[in-house]
Every structure is written in C-alpha cells, then in structure tokens.
Amino acid sequence: MVLVSNQEYLCEEEKRLKEDKDRKQYWKRWGSYVAERQWATVREDYSHDGDAWSHFTHDMARSRAFRWGEDGIAGVSDSHGLQNIAFSFWNEKDDFLKERLFGLSNPQGNHGESIKEAHFHLDNTPTHSYMKYLYKYPQRKFPYEDLIKENAKRSKQENEYNVVDTGIFDDGRYWDIFIETAKEADNAEELLFRVTAYNRGPEPAPLHIVPHVWFRNTWAWGREDLKKKPSIRKIAPTTAHSKHHKLGERYVQLSPSPGTGPSGNDVQPTQLYTDNETNYKEIWGGTNKTPYVKDGIHKRIVDEQLDAVNPKNTGTKMAAWYAFDEGEGVAPGECAVVRFRVGKRYEGFLDEELFDDIMEQRRAEADDFYYRISPLPMADDLRNIQRQALSGMLWCKQYYHFVWDQWANGDPGMPPPPPGRKTIRNKEWKHMHLDDILSMPDSWEYPFFAAWDSAFHCIPLAMIDPDFAKKQLDIFTREWYMHPNGQLPAYEWNFGDVNPPVHAWSVFRVFKIERKMYGREDLDFLERVFQKLLLNFTWWVNRKDADGNNVFEGGFLGLDNIGVFNRSEPLPTGGVLEQADSTGWMGFFCLNMLNMALELAKHRRIYEDIASKFFEHFLLISDAMQYRSGGEEKPLWNEQDGFYYDAISWGGPWSHQMPVRSLVGLIPLYATLTLEPEIIRKFPSFKKRLDWFVEHRSETATRNIASMKRRGKDDRMLLSLVNEDRLRAILTKMLDESEFLADHGIRSLSKYHEDHPYSMDVNGQKFQVSYISGDSDSGLFGGNSNWRGPIWIAVNFLLIESLQRFYMFYGKDFQVECPTGSGDYMHLGHVAEELQHRLQHLFARGDDGRRAINDRNDMLDYDPHWKDYLWFHEFFDGDTGRGLGASHQCGWTGLVAKMIHDSGNTCRLPQTPRTPTTAASHYFDDVWTTKGKPKKPHYLRRSSTTRSIGMRSDWGETSTNGDDEAQSPIQKNRSNSIGIPDAEDLKYKKEMDEHIHTYVSDQLERLKTKDSGGVQPDELETMLDGHVDGETNGGDKKNGSGGYFSNNSPFDHDD
C-alpha cells in the first residue's frame, strides 16, 4: 500500500490492513486495548465530591470490580473490552501479586500523578499481529512505601522521586520480562503469547509468572440478563474453555515450561479460578455477593489461602500459575519461559516448535513493515527511536467506555449515587455514549482521550494506519461525542473545557498524508468531517468572541499555567482576557477550513463560496488582532518589544497589556497559508470574491495580505497574521538562545523571565510568572505539567510547519540569524530543519553516549539492558532536555517519528554545532530520509530471544533438533498459520526488493551529487496544503512524480 516511485507492493502487514479495511478479516478485533490504569478515573468515580483519586485507589483495584473498563500489564482484549488477557508476577518478596502498574495519585505526587514503574512499549503493528512489551520487575521487595513517603517529603521545587532513583535495580537484581503476542497468519482470532523473563541479577531468584484471562464485569449492574453471564472453566490439565454470548467459545491452551531448577523437570501450570466480583468484605467489611471474588488468585498465591479460589475450576476469571521456584529459582543470566494461546481452535496440546515459528514469522513481518515504510538508509539509533515511538502509540490505543446517563444516574443493581453527584462535572454532556478504541495521550497517566492531543496523535498514526487515524478524527465530530452546540469534548475531567482548535489542521494533514503515502484520496472523509467542523467553527465564533470583534478569549487552551492568571477562571482584575494565542488559533482554524474548502471545490464547485467565506473571515480576524476601528492599533502587538502579548480589556479604550514573552506570542505564527496562482485561476468565483474584497476593503486587504501587488516566490500569495517586519521581530526573540531557543527546541516561556519575572499585585495578592525550566512549582491545573519554560514537541511541530510555509513564500532571500547573535544566517527552510534536528536530539545519543531525556543517569545511558529503550515524556526541561511529566506520552511526543521521517537524512548524529556550510534537505510529507545502509528483511530466523530460551518442554509432539528438524504433522497442516511465503510470494517479494533497492540507490546518488532539481509540483501540493492544480494530486498513480517517496528536495542545496 505504500507507494515507492509510483509502485505499490504489499508486505504481509499491509495485506492484513487491506483485509481489515475490506472487511475480509477483522484483524483489529483483538489488540493491546487494555488500559494500564483504570482506577482513579472519572468513569469509576461515584463519590459525592468528585474526588476520583481517593474514591477508587490502587489498593482497591486488586479487590474491587471496575464498572467501565479493565487494566493490566501488557493487556490484550477484544475491541469492546469484554474478554481480557494480561500478566501478573510475584517475586516472593512483595505483599501482593503484581497485577497492575503502580503510580502515585495526584495528591500523593509532588508534581501530581506519576507512574513509578519501569516498562517499555518495544514493538507493535497496526493490526496487532505482533506486539512486544518489556517490564522490569525488581527481585527485592517493590519500594511502594518508599516512593510514597519520599515524594510526600519533596517540595514542588524538587524533582520527582522515581523508581530508578530508589536503587531497586542496583546490581542488576531485577527481571527483564519480555511479553510477546502474535496472531496466526490465516486467522485473526488466534492469539499466541510468550513470556521470557531473564534474571539480570548475580544470584538465583524465584519468579512466579501468572497470566490472567477474565471477562469484564457486565452482569453485576442490573443491566444485563444474568443468563448471559460469561464463564471460563477447566476442561483439561492444560486447557480452559471460555464462553461469552457475544464472543462465542474460545480455548486457553497452556504449555508446560522448560524447567529452571536442579531437576530439570518441566514447570506445570496450575489453573486457578475465581470471579471478577468485588470483595466487599475486604474493602468495606460488608458481605460478598459471591464466595469467590476478584482478589482470590492473589490470596491463593501470596497468602496461601487454598479456599480463595473455586475448587470446581470455573468462574469469570482464571489464571495459569507458573512457579519457577525449584531450588533457589532461576540462575543468573538464565530465563524462564511461558507459552500459551487463546483462540477458537482446539488441538489438545500446544506445539511449541510451530508456536515459535509463528511468533518469529510475525516478528520478521513487523521488521519488514517498518523497514518498507522507511527504506532509505537511516542511523540505527534514529530507526530505533522511530520504531519505539510508533509502537508506543499503538500500545496507547485503549478501550474507552462511558455512557453519561448510566454513569450519572447509577445502575439498577447498585446503590443510587450520592445526591448532587450529577452536578459535580460534565452535567451538560448528557448525550455522550462512548464505546470505542481510542488513542490515549499516555497509557497510564492519561488513560482517557484529550481532544487536541488526539489531533496530534493522528499525524504519525496516519503514516502507518491512515484508516485508524481518520476514524479517530471523525469520531470526535459524531453526535455521540460532539456537543449539540458544536463544541468538541475536551477530556473526562471536564468535557466542557476548551482545547485549541487543531482538529481541522489534523484532518487535512491526515488526508494529505494518506494521499501522498498510499495513493488514496478519501474525499468522503474530508467532506464529512469538514461539514461537522463548520458547526465547531460557529461554536467558537459565538461562544469565545465576547464582543463580536474577532478577538477571542478561550480560556486555558491546553497551556495550563502559562498565564499570569488561571485563564479558565474569571480575572481577579475584572474585565476580559483578550488572548493572542486564542486569536492566533482561530486564524489557524480559519485557514485550515479555507484549505479544505478549496480542496473540496476541485470536485464540488459549491465549496468555492465557503472558501470565500473563510478567506474574508481570516482577514477580519487578522485585522482585529492588530487594529481597532479607524485604524487605531490593537493592544495585542507591542511595537517596542516586537512581540504579541495577552491584554486585559475593560471595554472601550481601557486595556492593559501583560508583557509576558511566552508561547502565546508565537502562536500567531501558526496562522499562515500560501495561495498558489493556479488555485486562484482555477476557481473564478473565489477569485472574483477575492478581487471584490481587495477593491472594496483595500485597507484591510493591504494590511493583511503580504502582498496583493508584490507576490512571493513563484508568484504566490501569503495569508498571515504577521507581516514581514513582525515576522523578523518575533524570530529574533524565538531564535535567541537567551530567550526561546534551547539546545533541544523552542521553550514555552522565554528564559528572559528567569531574571526578569513578570508580576501583578491585585487586591493585595501577588501574581507572578517566571521562567522554570523543569516541573511546575505550583499546583495550578493539577501541577503535573508546566508551560513556563519546558519544551513541548507538539507546539514545536506546528512552529516548524509554519516556518516551512513562510519559506515557500519568501524563498531563499529571506534570511534570519540563527541562533540570534551567531552570525550564521539561514533561510526559513533551514531554520525549520534546525529545529527538527534539535528536537530529535532529545532522544538521540550524543557523542558521549548519553540521551538528553535520561538526565545523565548512567544506568539508562550505558547499561546494555537499558540504553536502547526509551521513554517518550510529555515535555522536556528547557535547559537540559530532561524528560518530564507522563513517561509514555507517545501521543504528541510520538511526533518525533514524523520529524525523523521529514529530516532524518540530514540530522547530525551525534549532535554538533551547525555551520553555514551544513547541507540541508527537507521532505514535507513526501520523503522519509534516512542514514545508514538499507537492510533486507528476512524470514524465519531464530531471534536472540528464541535462541536464549534453550530447550522447550518435554511434553507433546515437539522437535528438539533445531530448525532443520522435519515438520510435525500439525506443522505441515498448519503452514498457513505460520505464513511461510510460497514460490509466488517469494517472486513477488524479490521484485519488490529489487525495485526498492533501485529507488534507494537513486536517492543516495541524488543526495551525493546534490541534484535537487528544484521543487516539483507534487511536493508543493503537499507542502502548500494541497494548493496545486487539481489535476496533479500527489500520490495519484497517474502522476509520474513518484508516489510517496519523491526524488527531489524542496530546499535547494545552496552551499
């Protein structure tokens, strides 16, 4: 499906994606959809005061049934979260079974809620045909109390105390537990699970591996006929049978594990059964509704309570208990292995040789998939970063269930909720009925959607699974999500809060990425979402422009503590806060709607009128941001400072500007668009209206179109909130390393305010903003994020795109000093690329072998069992690049994968100072550039993981002579399950590989000879938001431009 030089070749994972799209096989029915935290979510909060953190705690989760979802470690479920498979462990030191990841609640953390574990999302494919997860489990007693007490002692001015700070991993006394999941090649319902746990310590240690299979409790709430209650029961020593009225019958088939003790005897699994029911006695001292409850398996294994599990071996929750505790346990450097399968096929036993062949084939196909998305040479480190970023995004897909009516009014089978509970939050969102797989911002810290986060998620997701990305964007505009008044829901803590309007931008970018990369132009998607976004735009105009003057308020707009005051509350000064960022966002929204209208107008001319509407509306917003009626200056721009600031307005001429140099003053740069002369000529109605506006409102047009008479590069027209003079003034500060420009990107607040804080005294109370490079020093908005200095990748990403658009208008002749004061001048294309490189170096190793995100932690940087695994943090220290906030924020931090896609070829590894002679080459949507030698994917090679497993169990018909052993009868009959290529497949793949090899060679030769050849129309089509003659659609097979990977660089080499 990925086009390479206008040719389409399908690898195995792409074939699965196509089958799923065509509804031939439901490959996405099962995936990594189990949350890593369900406790303390708003959905599970039935308290009288809305305190979700104390109403359902981590300790309660072990014994209390969830109402709306489930959680677990490396969990897999169906797409409605009905049947779940996840993993638990015990080291014989902890007081309870490790069934879920631990973290601090918001009140417990000195910087809000925070996970206190070490786990990594290593691999995942869009159809979840192969998944890999790493959990590092201490061999000593897990430091629960230490983490709680030490963080409680620390002030908001101190760093968080994390699990890697406790010393629990010293001397390697921990388990590296790799959890792999694979699907059979011919059946999306057949799931294979393999756990490989390595003892990294210096001594033998025991380990209990306990996979769980259970049903979400849908029967206890009085809304489902009890006759439909699912069940799972033991039918053989290594087999369980499950039955669900929607999922049908399935089998859990277990394999004995190779022994690790002195006897060498296999480890036989013990099946344990209980019910997924609340232990009322344990939590509240009440009476249990069933004799066997949720924490029964924990009590049986850890507390040795034999009567805690059902002796009849039936229930709604089962576990397979593998105890690797013979002698002293598993020897140092050795591993324990568990294999089992869940599916509809029942064979009586598990063929381990066949099992491993399937697992290895899916892993090789995952390699092939990611290699073919990025076939050009790339530094191994960048390729690893990109792979883990994209895999992490797929691990952050979770099942999300919420029905407002049931949540607010309670269930018939349970006590009624406290009076007044319905008025605590979200009382105006009664229409919401959510039952979907959604992309979450973070797998543990933010196990709920956030509207503007989701918009950013969809950019890298579109590279690997455009259908899922489109569904995410579409679903937020559907009537069971979007409010009837047109507002998009923000997040579950307050659906009515206001996030920046980035949805339109994401919709059009995803549309273009799919067109460019896959050769598909989904106009139905574009038009459907565009129509709904008209409602959202109208909501903004009606609700967030108090005076009707096209200057917008908006509230906190996702930037939490960036302002002097809490922007979500009434000002203590009185008046209205006129926000430079809100008005900038609306200009940005307006231009993206204009963009989509012009794209749709290529196919339906009625959209010309709508394009004209957004053209004029943008000019009015632009004019209002800078001028009052009669031409009087608007107080959002400060001529002396050369920057945009928020202002408090009390009506009429009375206003007060607050000179805080923050991201608020950079956001107006986002609102920029170049109009191609071909577009203007193609749409006579649009051109007529444009000409009318210029003639009859010439003053407004002249001020805001740069310029009507002097066109830019290639005769383009520029729509922008900033003119050339203001652009230069803003960039002088933005590119100043003593202000915004950091080693690793653009700061959210100028470093100028470190020595020059801004403050206001209001009624005896002092309000102040100062530069803080790391975590927040206040509890504003929960205290777990900070926009007063750190680097945030999402907003940097938009700044980079804006610079690229400015470059397409001004060209090479417009140069700025970068960094300010360095004497090194660059055009804006090179500036954009420089920012991309700096952001990539948050993650990439430096010449000292360190990653900035790791904060000079020797174990994370140098230990061979840690150094290649990455956390994708929510934001980053503005001075050092240290990772901060949520640690698995693959959502918008996953945008680094797209940046590597755009500029990996020229990224300097290790990071070195840029010189005026550094070559630059940027590909905006068209080319994924890389370094290193291209690799050829391979099939059915034993990975190091498999080789290190050693002998398989002695039970069943399995081969013991390695890869050359003749296939067993089952293997011969099940070659389709493995997916071994036949002669025709191999021929097809050989042609594909030869084509890609030729393409890569051509690209490398072009880079070597600097034969850029200028900018081609298909590249402009993407770079300029689709504004090229409608007959030339990038990625369309009739276009000879070369499909997704073009042959030319938009930025001519000028050195």
Image: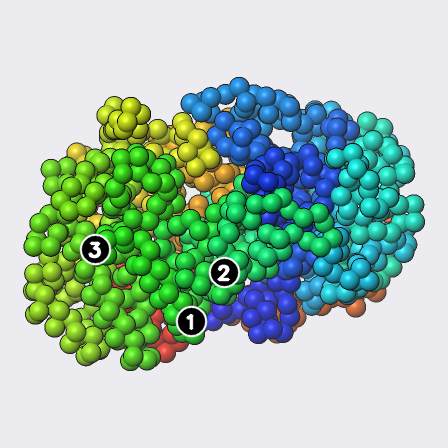
Are the residues flagged by discs 3 and 1 in contact, CB closer than 8 Å? Answer: no
Q: Residues within 10 Å of mark 1 (few under 14, many from 20)?
A: few
| Residue at image location 71% in from the left, 55% down from the top | 412
**300 relative position to 843: left or right:** right
Circle 1 is placed at which residue position? 528
Q: The residue under label 3 is which amino acid type?
A: Asn
Circle 3 is placed at which residue position? 549
| Residue at image location 87% in from the left, 59% down from the top | 348
**946 relative position to 873: left or right:** right
How much space separates mark 1 and mark 2, taking CA atoms? Answer: 15 Å
Circle 2 is placed at which residue position? 481
Which of labels 3 and 1 is toward the front? Answer: 3
**36 relative position to 310: left or right:** left
Q: Secondary structure at mark 2?
A: loop
How much space separates mark 3 and mark 1, taking CA atoms? Answer: 30 Å
Are the residues flagged by discs 2 and 3 in contact, CB closer than 8 Å? Answer: no
Who is closer to the viewer here, 242 or 938? 242
Residue 398, given in percent of the width and then of the height, sits at 59, 53
